[in-house]
Each structure stands twice: as C-alpha cells, then as structure tokens.
Image (cartoon, rainbow, N blue to C red):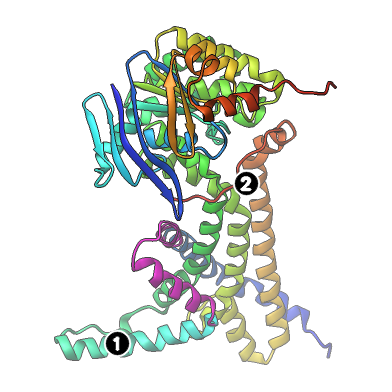
Amino acid sequence: MPIINFEFAIQEIPAVLKGVPITLAIAVVAMVFGLIFGLLIALCRIYRVPILNRLFIIYISFIRGTPLLVQLYVFFYGVPVLLDKMNQSFGTAYNADHISPLLYAFIAFTINVSAYQAEIMRASLNAVQIGQMEAAHSVGMTTFQALKRIVLPQAFLVALPNLGNTFIGLIKATSLAFAVKVVEVMALAKIIANDGYHFLEMYLVAALIYWLICWLLEVLFTFVEEKMRNKEIKQKKMNTTISKDLPLRV
Amino acid sequence: MILLKHIHKKFKNNHVLKGIDLEVSKGDVVTIIGPSGSGKTTLLRCVNYLEKPDEGIISINDLTIQTKKPVKKDILQLRRRTAMVFQHYNLFENKTVLENVTEGLIIAQKKSKKMAREIGVDILTKVGLADKINAYPQQLSGGQKQRVGIARALALNPDVLLFDEPTSALDPEMVGEVLEIIREIASGGVTMMIVTHEIDFACEVSNRVVFMDDGQIIEQGPPDDILIHPKQERTRKFLKRIMKEPDFTI
C-alpha cells in the first residue's frame, strides 16, 4: 500500500470543496466589517477622541496580543455563560444553543480583524500628507467631507497591499473556525479523514484548496493594485517636487 | 473688511504671534515680509483657521470669531470666505486638475456640476492650463501645479485670497510664470494677503507692506516707505541683509 492514497484524496476533493463557501463567507464578512470598524477605530485614535482613544489602545493591544484560537474559545464558551447570567438577572429567555456556530465565527473573526485593520488604516491615514486635509479645509470642506473625498481615497491606495495580505492571512485563519464547530474546509477534511484514517491525504487536499484560494486572491489583488496605481507609476517619474511628509492631524 | 485684533499664538513654549493687529480693506494687496521664524506664515494661517489662535478676534465683514470660544460653524464660514495658495501647492492628488478646481465649488459652495465645470475651465484657461484639465497633479511641473493652486483658490471667489510663500518651492525658472499670474489677479482688484520673500515683487504688486519680526508687526505702510525708506532699525537691518549684493559672481 502506498504512503499516500491518491485515489482516495482525489475522490474526496469535491466533498471538501463544499466547505469553501463557508470559508469564504467567514473571511469576507470579517474583512468587510473589520474594515468598517477598523476605520472607525483608526479615526478615533488619530483624532484622539477622549476615552475611546484609550479604550481602543487597550483593545488593539489585547486582540493582537492573544491567539485567535483563544479568542474563539473565549467567545464560544463565554457568550452562553453571559446569556445564562442575563436570563437569570433580567428574566429573559435567550437560548445560547440556538445561536449558529457560524455567527460566533463571524463576530469573533470580525473583532480580531478589526484590530489589525485599525492599525493598517491608522498608518495609511498618517501617510497621507497633512497638506491634503489643510487644502480641503481651505476650500471650505468640513472634516468629514475632506476625509471622504480627499484623504480616505488616498489612504486606501496606501493600505491596499496590507489589506490584501490581511485578507490572505484571514483565509488561512478561518481554518481555526472548526474549533467552534463551524463546518468549513478544514472541518470537512478532518471529518472525512476520521472515517478511514486518511489524515495525511485529507490535510493535503485542504492545503491545496487553501493554496488555490490564496493564489487566486493574490492574482486579484495584484490586478486591482496595478489598475489603481497605474496613473501613479506613470507620473512618479515626472514628479520632481519636494513634498512635506507630515502625518495627518486635526 | 478684514480685521485681526490682538492675535496670539503659542506652539508649546514658543510664542509665535505676540498680539497682532491688522486691518485689510477691500481691494488691498498686503504683502507680509520678515525673517524666517517671524510668524508671518502662522499669521496667514490664522486668518483661515488652519492654525488656531490662542487669543484675539478675527473678523471678515460681518463674520466675527472670538478665538477664545470659536463656533464650529463660524470657522467653516471663515474658511468659505477665504482661499489659500500653499507653498507646497497641496493639490488633491487623487483628483484631476479640473476636479481640483471644481471640488470646493461643488462640495462647499453647492454649485451645480455644470456650473462648476464652466467656472473651472474658464479659470484654468486664464492661468494657461486649458490643455491640462484632465491631467493629475503628479503629471505637472511645479509652476503648473502652483498655477492650479491659484486657480483653485481664485475659483472660489473668496473675500480674501491668501498666498503662503507661493514661489518658495519652485525652481527659479518657474517663479516668473507664477508671479505673472498673481500680478494679473492683483490688478483685477482681488483682496490679497501675500507672504513672500520676493521683495521686488512685493514692492511692485502690493499697496501695503507689513514687516514682521519676532511675532510682532514692526512697521507697515506703502511699499516705498517700508522697502526704500524704512523707519525702524530692524526693518533696515532685514532689508540690508536680503538686498545685499552678492560679493562673488558665478
């Protein structure tokens, strides 16, 4: 008998592929909401919003300083306990058993990603020259209008490579979701492997699927980035002026 | 029509403006000169509140701001009645030349896109950039950028046009084209405040010169009085220093 049963592996690929939509769903939901929250957190930090700024510093430090797996467990086992306590205190009747594991994953991954996105967005906003905000103010825009029309579009361009990396990291991180009973690619691979003790085969199948997804994403991000930077690359050569590279402030 | 009363500004322990009183009438072209660090740029930036004065009163026509307790709405109004040309141009990097000019008209002044476009094309033609309206700032030379900067400010039809060392970042051969445009605007009766190191230009274009040193206005008056027959010792010293003929030739 060969070391690797390729026949079995190939035969089970379609079964594992069924987990791809869940994997992508977790990644996309966490990415989108993480970006929204991350941006809000970054703005709170840049504008030094009282209390919130301090709070978010601790939040970011905690989330980035603890393993995602631990966060998932804390969330998965913590929320039911909290709900029980709440039901006792307020006489409500929320049942933690009715919460889909996927929802836990969505929220936990979003929280995790938002902390990283916050730092990416903060750095990118700071990379936009302060003169851009001043010029927007000088033509009579409000700070909100200036952010929306002038500063954020430029910051996103700066953030793009980092956001791409985060997304690829996120795809791989979703494999942890099986720890909280979400049936995605990794979980399916494991379940099938259990059947006939084909662990190596199934993990290789999972690895290939993750690689394929990430490779496709890399191609996509490179394409988007190039498209957006097209103008800039052409123009860089002609750009001979000195620009003030001061961080954005109020 | 523009009245600055008792303006004070400190950066930490550095007292940059020590009680500035200045009046600018409609149609005046006021040039502010002085050694570096004298506070002239800070003063100009206080006029449109890019720098927040610690003390004093700023008023433009019927709008008065008590800088001790400024109202947000008033600051926005102040910025919508003024426009600024920056030393480092600060063109919106993510917008085309035409959009740079129309942005303030559409967003701040709520003009229709069509009308803004007409104004934009008209003014860009006046500054000689009709063929560049769809270019991005990075594709322009320094002189062209500054002409866009001037067009952007002028399009807003402000009560006062503020120039913050508009030629200091330019290559020498481009200074002329920018000064030429400022000269034209000045002859059109637009109220202007100019911070500059171009003494000859100040003499020619302005009807009043203000000499500042160490956060104070030392003296002010018609260009001939200040630049040719200064009364104050400090003014004389400054002029002597910058007018001094070079004792070497290249």
Q: Position of residue A139 (x, y in %)?
A: 41, 31
Q: Main secondary structure of the magenta part?
A: helix
Left or right of A94? Residue B107 is: right
Q: Amino acid at mark 1?
A: Leu
**Residue at point 54%, 49% (across, down):** A156
Is A104 one of the magenta-colored residues? no
Pick whichever of labels 1 and 2 is earlier in the sequence. Answer: 1
Viewport quadrant of the C terminus of chain B:
top right
Residue A176 quadrant = bottom right
**Residue at point 40%, 70% (across, down):** A54
Left or right of A4? Residue A112 is: left
Q: Position of residue A160 (x, y in %)?
A: 59, 52
| Pointer 1 residue | A82
Pointer 1 chain:
A
Query: Of all residues shown, which one is farthest toward the left?
Result: A91
**Residue at point 66%, 69% (across, down):** A209
| Pointer 2 residue | A224
Per the image, label 2 sits on a secondary structure element best described as helix
Pointer 2 chain:
A
How would you rate the neighbour count of disc 1 (Cα within 10 Å): few for under 14, some for 14-19, many for 20 or more? few
For residue B129, say whether it is visible: no
Per the image, label 1 sits on a secondary structure element best described as helix
Task: Classify B52 as above or below B44.
Answer: below
Q: Amino acid at mark 2?
A: Val
Disc 1 vs disc 2: Cβ atoms closer than 8 Å?
no
B188, B125: nearer the viewer: B188
How would you rate the neighbour count of disc 2 (Cα within 10 Å): few for under 14, some for 14-19, many for 20 or more? some
Residue A106 quadrant = bottom left
Task: Classify A214 as above or below B20.
Answer: below
- Magenta region, residue range: A37-66
Q: Position of residue B140 (x, y in %)?
A: 65, 25
